[in-house]
């Protein structure tokens, strides 16, 4: 996979402990995985929540992106933000680790299903993804939700604003179906703080979906579907 999620942190020890407590495995340095998601904890003061894409050259894509959004450069690396405010880093060269996603994710959080972003401009956000080489695989912009996949299976879902619950751009999404209640109880037992208990999607007022955040502010949607 030539893509890696970047989460910033003001406390590297706390961020590492968060992922270790939830059953993520440390691959090398500050890079963790649950078998599907590949996450790098970055404690540089200039780091921002987003994701990094790797390719030998981004010259052609950068010229196209300049027509629709500002392209910035820092320490020899280009980056943009889409209409969700998510930072997308365009790194030339190989990723820091060789990684092939497993068939199933194995952390406490359950079944990883990619990133979710809430955007104020669906057409522009999806155009950015298409320029970067992502392909539409599910949904449609006019439906208010669309999934794009690229870079060895790296998935990004775009949703129109506003969703009926708190939203932190970007967020990792986990769908666990009928097992989600069990997953939520495991999260509670590990003393992981829950940012929002969601009852919006059932008539009984049951907490069947939750949102948590890592120490750097990256969101996690732990949903039934």
Image: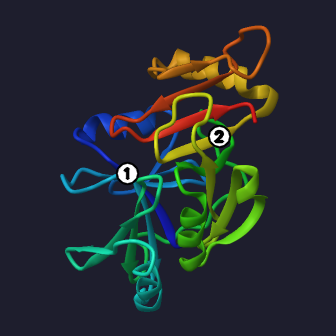
List x then y, in percent, for residue 215: 34, 35
**In which quarter of the view is residue 101 placed?**
bottom right
List x then y, in percent, for residue 73: 25, 75
**Of residues 126 and 148, the one drawn nearer to the viewer in this rendering:** 126
Answer yes or no: is residue 154 visible.
yes
In the picture, measured across the screen, residue 3 lies left or right of residue 141, that is: left
Classify 24 as above or below 49: above
Label 2 SS = strand
Answer yes or no: is residue 1 visible.
no
Between discs 1 and 2, the one toward the N terminus: 1
Label 1 SS = loop
Q: Residue at x 44, y 37 (%)?
A: 20
Discs 1/2, front: 1
**Of residues 161 and 54, the one drawn nearer to the viewer in this rendering:** 161
Q: Residue at x 60, y 58 (%)?
A: 122
Label 2, on which residue?
Answer: 174
Label 1, on which residue?
Answer: 49
List x then y, in percent, for residue 9: 28, 43
Give yes or no for contact between labels 1 and 2 (Cβ–Cβ under 8 Å): no
> How are the colours assigned in the image?
rainbow
């Amino acid at each position: 996979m030539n893509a890696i999620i970047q989460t910033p942190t003001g406390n590297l020890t706390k961020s590492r402990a968060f992922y270790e407590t939830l059953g993520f495995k440390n691959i090398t340095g500050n890079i963790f995985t649950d078998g599907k998601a590949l996450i790098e904890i970055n404690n540089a003061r200039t780091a921002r929540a987003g994701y990094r894409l790797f390719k030998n050259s981004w010259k052609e894509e950068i010229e196209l992106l300049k027509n629709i959004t500002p392209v910035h450069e820092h320490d020899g690396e280009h980056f943009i933000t889409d209409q969700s405010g998510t930072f997308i880093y365009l790194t030339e060269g190989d990723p820091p680790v060789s990684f092939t996603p497993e068939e199933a994710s194995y952390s406490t959080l359950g079944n990883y299903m990619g990133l979710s972003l809430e955007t104020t401009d669906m057409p522009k956000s999806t155009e950015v993804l298409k320029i970067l080489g992502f392909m539409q695989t599910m949904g449609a912009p006019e439906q208010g939700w669309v999934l794009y996949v690229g870079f060895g299976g790296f998935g990004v879902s775009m949703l129109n604003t506003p969703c009926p619950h708190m939203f932190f751009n970007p967020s990792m999404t986990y769908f666990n179906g009928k097992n989600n209640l069990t997953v939520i109880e495991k999260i509670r037992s590990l003393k992981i703080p829950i940012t929002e208990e969601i009852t919006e999607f059932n008539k009984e007022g049951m907490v069947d979906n939750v949102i948590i955040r890592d120490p750097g502010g990256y969101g996690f949607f732990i949903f039934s579907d």
